[in-house]
Image: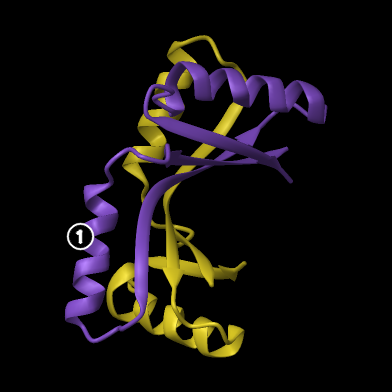
Chain colours: A yellow, B purple
Amino acid sequence: MKARVHVTLKTGVLDPQGEAIRHALGAMGFAGVDAVRQGKLIELDLAETDPKAAEDQVRAMCEKLLANTVIETYTVELE
Amino acid sequence: MKARVHVTLKTGVLDPQGEAIRHALGAMGFAGVDAVRQGKLIELDLAETDPKAAEDQVRAMCEKLLANTVIETYTVELE
C-alpha cells in the first residue's frame, strides 16, 4: 500500500525557503504571488495492506522521524 | 487562489534522501517499508482568480524555477 505524507511548517513559523522562492518569482516577472510556503512530500511503499494499520504506522513514523512536530504539521494520505 | 505544487524526482533518478529515510525507518524498527521517495511541496497564494490562467502561470513557474525538469516532474493542484 502506498502512503503520501505532506510535512509543512506550522502557521507562524518563518519559512525562509518559501520566502526565497517568492522573491525569485517576483524577480523573474511573475506578478501576484502573495505568499509561498515550502514543505516536504514523502512517498512510502508499505508492505502493510490494512489501511487502518498502515495509517497508524505512518503516523508513528511522522511523530518519530519524518516531521519535527515542534514546528511542523503533517498529513497522511493512503492510496 | 491557492495552488499546490508537488515536485518529485523522475522514476529511475536516484533518491539518496528517500533512501536515507528508508534506512532510518528500518533502524528504528519500522518493518515493511519497501521504498521511500522524497519530494517537495510548494504552496502558492496567487492574486489570479481565473483557474485556467492560474494553472498556466504556475506551470510556467515550475518550468522556469520550481522544478528541474531534467530530473524532476511536477503536478499542479488548484484549490
Q: Is residue A61 above or below residue A18?
A: below
Residue B78 picture location, percent across and down: 71, 41
x and y percentages locating residue B7 in the rendered image: 47, 39
Q: Name the residue nearer the viewer: B41 or A21.
A: B41
B30 lies left or right of B24: right
Number of marks in the image? 1
Tell me the residue at 32%/41% (across/down).
A16
Q: What residue is rendered at 36% in x and 80% in y?
A: B32
Image-quadrant location for residue A50:
bottom right
Mark yes or no: residue A20 visible. Answer: yes
Tag 1 subunit: B
Element type where label 1 sits in the image: helix
Q: Which residue is mark 1?
A: B20
Vertical order, A9 against A20 (above or below): below
State the image quarter where residue B9 is shown. top left
Q: Residue at x 45, y 28 (%)?
A: B66
